[in-house]
Each structure stands twice: as structure tokens, then as C-alpha cells.
Amino acid sequence: MHQINKLLAKRKLICVLVSGLMSTTAFSQSEPSLEITATGSQEATQSILTPTKILQGDELLNKLGTTLGATLANELGVSATGYGAGSSRPVIRGLEGARVQILQNGLSVGDVSNISQDHAVGNNMQNTHQVEILRGAAALLYGSGSSGGLVNVVNDRILTNLPDRATGAINTSYETVNNGRAGSVEVDGAFDSVAVHVDTAINNANNYSIPGSSTQSQGEPPGGWTVPAEGNLGNNYTGKLPNSFSNQNNLGVGVSYIGQNGYTGVSVERLNNNYGIPTPEGGSINQSQNRYDLQHQTRDPFAGFSSFKFSAANTNYNHTEFNNQGEAASLWKNIANEARFELAHNPIAGWKGTFGAQVSAASLNATEVGSGSYAIVPPTKTNSNALFWIEEGRWNSLQGNLGLRYNNVAQKPNLGTELVPEPVNTGGDTPAISLQNRNFNLLSYSAGGLWNFLQGHGAGVAYTVSQRAPSAQELYSYGAHESTATFDIGNPNLNKETSHNLEFNIQKTSGLMRGKASVYANRFNNYIYGYYTGQSVPDVENFSVVVAQQAAATIKGIEGELTYNWQQHGVGGRIFGDASQGTFDAGGNLPLQPAPRLGAELAHQRNGWLTNATYIYSYQQNRLASWEIGPAPSYNLLNAGISYTEKIKDVNWTVYMNLKNLLNEQIRYATTPMAVRLYAPQPGRSLMVGLRGTF
């Protein structure tokens, strides 16, 4: 076995080196730069005190997927969930759901993706300009409880500067694995002091091809589960995976007035998303969302302050869940309103910072079609009021950072909702719960320091305490959930969840060889999780009974990367890796934890040609919760491609070819619930060809 592992390691290295010389997955919009990195990534600051990753430009185009999770899946410390092609959310350092807040232009995206992994994030990625990953004090600007981190998707619909001419982009592509056809257009222009933005995109994909068969062969599982062929309705699929299709379209318009000292703008967006749910039972979700945004900023509003910014958003979200016969089963609605202001002050004794306030209100209503009764979660109103204050200072070779946020969160379910118990296979009924209003006072704070002990070399430490209120589904769920094959039972008596995160960092930010590394420990009081009781509900397809519980838990991890650039040759390289382990303090592993990974990237850029290759090896994940079926298998992911850019008149045209999962590996994310991980692998080998123009 040792010799086999050595041979496999050699094969992986050869694949990386050869593919790096032949191909890439990037497409370029501009002339080659004198210095490149393997990814083109940037950091928000030269500090890892508040590690803010910015994905933009060629790197974003290279990694862009149909979902946010697919776009970020291979970032350092970031994994993804995988409900087919239609729904995928980022998992940061082993944390997902409500612990990873998703924003759009600095305000909540307003969807219900944090309730369940089968619910898609309510944004379209094709017209995205930038994706930001924030942790520590930087995340406290926008929310408490983001113990994993916070992701902000920026689409620049509200322009903040007047374009001196009409600019825009057009893109079209075709992908073989799913017969995917995609296209997008965006245009920016100005009329006197008024700037206008228009964007639209469409992405239609059929069921995708998978390598091998759809079923992960395992032994007899706990909790009422049955393994295919019986558990997969007698089917073990090869070729195309049923219910893995995805069809998206959106339209966005923004108008802003831009003056000498600031801007005021509004935008509107319509998003439609129809996608399949590749579970044994099958089904689909038809999602739509209307969103309205308002932004205003005044620079130098008065003495001592550099900026005042106000922003607000209204989101009207709904989706309908269909069974495998195409019949509507449940309707979900969420109306969300949010407003915030930020006031940034000028430097005082080396410190500069921002303070402000934020209010939000959301109304969640999920009903069964036909009966009109609640679906899984009773109608619930959630109100949040917050104050925040962030400071950052610099003194010669030292930097400091402080953050403070206070939140009051109120959860108010419809107390008149009737929760009907179901018989379980061990006799008796499912445990009853009593609905009650809950109110939580949350205090989160962060402090850290960075010492630049040599030019371009730094070492830092950061400590963050983050408190999170239980979500509506964690408190009040009571019913069958087809997409996870579970009968979910909340706990109205849950306490707030508190995480204590300590992180040590080291970095090198200058020279041809650069790198960074982090080691961290995240200790949770009252970690909220779904516990599989071992019972099942015979009347609901033997779904496993899952009860919300709390326990002390710890996640420890390490991540790092090294990059090297050969400026004179236009070649760049990168090696990276991350690993985390989540355990209950009383013993046992946390559920849905990502597997350790190692990876390498090579890139070459010359005379309009841009090539690169990325290889990632994900280890087998056998550190599963006691009720999880495993292990989640290891896999080799190799992506590559090539692009050529040439300017014709005033348009930069790029033709590109992307190759994904070149080794045609069967990929199953350990972060995906068993209902999908066991029965629905990720897409197999794929070729994408496309044309993009920017002007």
C-alpha cells in the first residue's frame, strides 16, 4: 500500500507539471503584466490581521461557477456544499449555514439558503465583479455570528464614479458535461451627472454526466437509512444524473447621481432560478427574487470625518419545491428589509475607523401547497438591531485592530401554529416542542496585532469572540424535509452560540517568493447541531429524526500557501494546503466537516496567451460524526485550459477553453448531507469553450 501511495503521488506531480505547460483555466481581459501570480489574487490590505480575500479580475473569471459555493470551493480554507449544480454554499474553516453570512453589496442577500443546503443562494454569479471573504474584525462591520467568516458579493450595479465613455462586457459559452449554454451582457454609461448600469445573464444546463455510477457503496447505515438499490428507488444511475439540471436568468438595472462629494443611487434586480434536487426521492425548486437597493455616500461630510454612507435593501424572495412527479409540494416566502449607516473618522493618534448602526427585519413563511399548513418551519418574524465600531492603527512596524458589535435579535414564531407529532419506529411519537418568542442580546468583539519584523515580513495574532442567535429553523423546525431525507425537530430553548477564535499568522509579502500561513483554534460554547437520534418516521418514507442540540465543541485548523514568480518569463507557481478538524469536547466528531486538501497551480502568460492548471488532492474524510455514513472518498481534481486575447478596434476579445475534472474523478464533498453525498457525485470531465469581449 505504501508503494502504491508513492506511485500515485508521483503521477499527481507529473500531471500538475505537464498540464501547467500545456493549458489553463483563465481568460484574460487585459495586456499581460510584468509580474503575475498563479491566481492573480489580491488581499484587501497588506495585513493578515483581518484576512480579507478579494476575488476579482482574471482570477474571478477563471474560477467563476454557476453558484457562489462552486466559485469559492477551492479557495484557501474554503470548501463548498454540493446539491448538484443548482445549489452550493461556501463552507469556511469547517463552518457553514448561519455561521457564514452571505451579503450582496454589503447587505444581506435576503434568501433562505442558510436554512438548508438545498436552498440556492439568491444571487447570480455571471455579472459579479468581486467576491470578498472577510474574517475577524472586518466581519463585525456587517454581522455577528459569522464565526466562519462572511462573504460579500459585489456587482457594482450602483456606480460610484462617472464613466467617461460607454463601457461593458459580453460573454457566451458552451459546456459539454451538461449541454450548458450561458450568456451575459452588461453596459455602463453616463448622461451628465447620472450614471446608468444594465446587466442581464442566462445560464441553462441539462442534467450533468457523472463518472461511474451515482451510488457510493456503503454498509448498513444507522437511523432508518437504506442503501441503494432499495434506498435509491431501485435505481443506481450511470451517465446523466437525474435532477441535476440548472436554469438561471436575471436582469439588473442601476441609476446613480454622482456629485463632487459623493453619490446617491438605486438599483433593482429580478432573479429566476429553476434547478433539480438530486436526492433519492428527486424533485426540483423554482426560485425567484425581486431586490431593491438604495445607496448614498458623502465624502468629508463634516470636520473630523472622511465618509458617511447609508444603504438599504428590500428583498422579496420565494421558491416552490416540487416532488419527483412535478407536483408543487411547498411554497417558501421571505420578505427582508435592511438598512445601515457607517461613519468613518479621520486618523486620531494613528487610529482610523468606522462606527455605525444596522437594523433588519425578515418575515419567513413556508406552507404546504394544498393544505396551507406550515412546511417544516412555522411562520416566523426575525428582527435585529445592531451597533458596531471598528478601529485599525499603524505605528512604524506595528499594526493594531479592534472591533466591537452589539446585536439584539428577536425571534417571533406564530404561536398558534399546530405542530403535529409523527409515530416513530421505536414506538411513541416524535418529541413535542412548545413555540415561544425568544430574545437574544449578543456581544461580539475582536482584537489583534501584527509585527512587521522585517521589510515585507510579518507575524500576527488575532482573537475574536462571536455570538450568534439560534436561527428560526434551529428553534422551531418540526416536520419532514425531503431534500435532506430527515424529520427535523427544533429546540425553542436553545441558548446563544458563542465562539472564541484564536489565530496566529505569519506572512511574506515582498520578493519573488511570497507566502502566508495561519494556525487557529475555534472554541464553541453551546455549538448548535442536528443530532440523528437513530429513530425514523415510517409514515414519511422512513426519514431519520434529527433534533437540534447544543454542546461544547472545538475546531482546529491550519492553512498556508507559497507563491513564486518568474517575472522575466511570465510564469507563476503556487502550492497550498488547508486542514481542519472539528470535535465535540465530550468526544466524537462534528458533522459535515471538510477533508484536508493539498494543491498546486502553474500559470504562463505571453503575447496575449494565458495558460494555467490547478490540481487539488482532497484526502479521504473518515473523521465523521457517529451518525454519518462514510468515509467520504478522496479525490484528485485537475482543471486546465487556455485563452487568447487580442484588441480589435476598441474591444478586447478573449477566446477561451476550459477543462474541468480532467481525470474524470468521482467527487463527493464531505460537507454535503448524506442524502446527496451518497447518491449524487459532482460533474465528470467537462470542456467549456467561450468568447468574451470587453470595451
Image (cartoon, grey):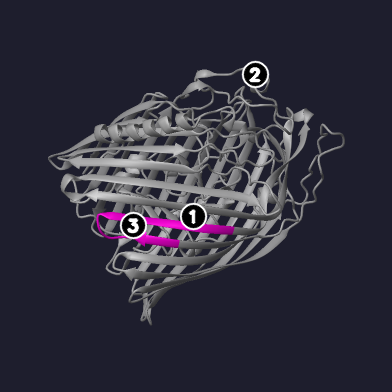
Taking the image as shown, residue 657 lies to the left or right of residue 314, namely: left
Which quadrant is home to the C terminus?
top left
Q: Which residue is mark 3?
A: 256
Q: Nearer the viewer, mark 1 or mark 3?
A: 1
State the SS at label 3. Answer: strand
Which residues lie in the magenta part?
A: 505-522
Q: CA distance from mark 1 to mark 3?
A: 27 Å
**Quick one: label 1 or label 3, which is nearer the N terminus?**
1
* Residue 151 at x, y percent in the picture: 46, 52
The answer to whether one can see residue 153 in this image is: no
Question: Is residue 262 positioned above or below 693 on the image?
Answer: below
Q: Which residue is mark 1?
A: 150
Question: Which quadrant of the view contains residue 230?
Answer: top right
Q: Which residue is mark 2?
A: 229
The answer to whether one can see residue 535 in this image is: yes
Q: CA distance from mark 3 to mark 2?
A: 57 Å
Q: Residue furthest right?
A: 428
